[in-house]
Image (spheres, helix red, strand yellow):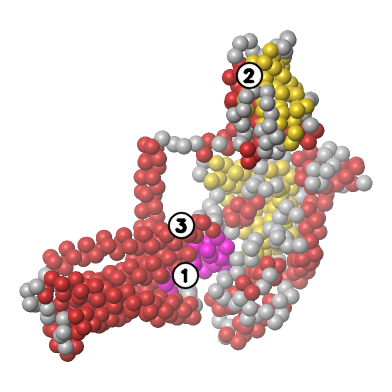
Amino acid sequence: MATPDAPGPGGAAPNGAAKERPVHIEVRNLTMAFGSFVLIRNLNFKVHRGDIFIIMGGSGCGKTTLLRHLLGLKEPATGEIFYDDINFTAATPDQREAMLRRFGVMYQGGALWSSMTLAENVGLPLDEFTDLSPAEIREIASLKLALVGLKGFEDYYPSQISGGMQKRAGLARAMALDPEILFFDEPSAGLDPISSRLLDELILELRGSLGATLVVVTHELPSIFTIGNDCVLLDAESRTAIASGDPRELLAHSTDPRVRRFLTRGEARENPEKANG
Amino acid sequence: MSEIGNANAGGQSPGVAANHDHQVDLVRGDGGNVVVRISGAWRMRHGMPSAKSVEAALTSGAQPQRVSVDASGLQEWDSSLVSFLVGLDDLCHLRGITFDRAGLPAGLNRLIELAEAVPEKKDARAAGLRASLIERLGNVALLYGESSGKFIEFVGTVAVALTNFVRGRARFRRSDLLEVIQGCGANALGIVSLISYLVGVILAFMGAVQLQQFGAAIYVADLVGIGLVREMGAMMTGIIMSGRTGAAFAAQIGTMKVTQEIDALTTMGISPIEFLVNPRMVALFLMMPLLCLYADFIGILGGATVGVTMLGLSLRTYLHETATAVTMTALVGGLFKSTVYGILIGLAGCYQGFECGESSSAVGDAATAAVVTAIVMIVVSCGIFAVLFHILGI
């Protein structure tokens, strides 16, 4: 069996199953910088259609910044991002807007529009981008809220519900237009372990039923191993990706001490045999 | 063995350790060995010596090879002692002296190890260094240059978005527009009434004191009428609205930026300028002249109150005199100015909101900046209008 182990900076090692699926997102030679401070250089990876792709790494390594680049909220210093072989980085504003419409984003704190009820939050993209009547929009918004377990909360304002519920409502909004790619920024941050696991299960179920590609930024190891089937591990020290591939395989076979340290919470330093127990 | 120095904070004679006093004695032994004897109670509330105070004593004469600690007289300690010892350790390290901590209690030793476990990041402090006055002045100038460029860019973006609005192609929610109109229109009536009534009273009172001396009390009506309609009505409404609405716009948009609500709009393909700025600009554009007209009216009533009660004029005479003094041109000029002020308030508020940093204090700063920018722009444009109207003969 091939070991999809640390391929060194810039290398991408999709696992066996993923190779057969078409490439959905491709990042080529991406360098991210704040002014003259380079955060990550020469990043390359591919995300295949239907994958749950994890962007992971320690605090401050640029996970969220990478997500902002993928969403066009920040421009790359150099390099390009492709969606379905269409260059997102070089696209015109109109083209970009059209591409963005196929994305759904769940933000870290939910980022629900606080002046609108949950139904209005979920309904806004439908209102803007479809010709549905208000009654139909309301119906679809109710359905999306029901999918994330928030049936009956249509007329609540974001400030009236708990943080976990806000995140799920954010997910409902992200799914409003049946996106092809769903992005998650730290889905389990600030959630208790049980809510966090339930959210993971929800994510898995949605992937199964929607058939969307999921990109998840997280550093929660339980989530990474539960939901991820491909990943890229960013490292703040070397400012590159130090590993990619299936996170479970990385845990089993990687020999890079940095990768092992991250995936085992630093508990089993350089002893793969013991870690697998 | 000879005592070569001591440092104590209590001010007592060396060697006497009171219960609330901490003391450091340096004893020079043989073979370049110095013993730092720590005794007494080390409590932060009683002050703390710095390692620097020992430095002089330590380095006078031959440089010691090794510094060890004797903590047998130590009664109690807290972070003040840890800080002192870490300082001492750095000092020894810098001078190539061996620092022997074996004489310290175990807990203290572990804290020192913890404090020194991660080496200092050298460039982390550079950002905190104070720049020289000229450098700071230059930075401020560059910052102003940059932000005025950004502001002009913002004005351009808003102009494009408003064009889309006029064409009916802009994305926004009608209910948002109505809500903002209510917020900066109807809800502002109370404060506008109070302020403009008082401004009317003040103008009339000041005029009355002077004009009464010439027996020209009736001209108070002219003074108040023209003053309010041409200048003060628009100006006072503008200042009230920049404090009330401009600050609110900046805080709302700034908070939306902090909570990523703006990002959520952008990634959904909805322009935040069209969605958030358009309704606010349109609401102010529509409401400011109405508020100004209302302020003019209430202000004239304030003047009339003084005229009737203090000068013994009849209400009818006062209003008639006002009506002959105030021309249509003056009224329209005032309303036009108030519309311009409204646009300036909206631009300043929304711009500062979008420029807001990502913390709660940044939202406060954005609100402050919005009010200051708006008031400055209002007063400057008021001056420009005065000159323009004079040239145009209005």
| Residue type (three-letter) at the residue carrying disc 3 | Asp
- Residue B191 percent coordinates (x, y): 37, 76
Q: Where residue B365 is drawn, which disc sits there?
A: 3
Judging by the rendered image, the residue that carries numbered circle 1 is: B276
Judge whether B33 appears above or below A189 on screen. above
Answer with the quarter of the image where residue B39 lies.
top right
Same subunit, labels 3 and 1: the answer reads yes
Mark 1 vs mark 2: in front: 2
Chain containing the residue with disc 3? B
Judge whether B61 appears above or below A23 on screen. above
| Residue type (three-letter) at the residue carrying disc 1 | Leu
Looking at the image, do the residues carrying marks 3 and 1 touch, with CB atoms under 8 Å apart? no
Judge whether B374 appears above or below B298 on screen. above
Mark 3 vs mark 1: in front: 3
Horizontally, residue A277 falls left or right of residue B32, namely: right
Q: Gap in Å between the C-alphas at discs 2 and 3?
A: 51 Å
Q: Where are the magenta residues, as a range?
A: B252-280
Residue at image coords 63%, 53%: A64
Q: Is residue A233 magenta?
A: no
Judging by the rendered image, the residue that carries numbered circle 2 is: B5
Residue at image coords 76%, 62%: A192
Residue at image coords 66%, 33%: B21
Q: Is residue A126 visible?
A: no
Q: Is residue B77 visible?
A: yes
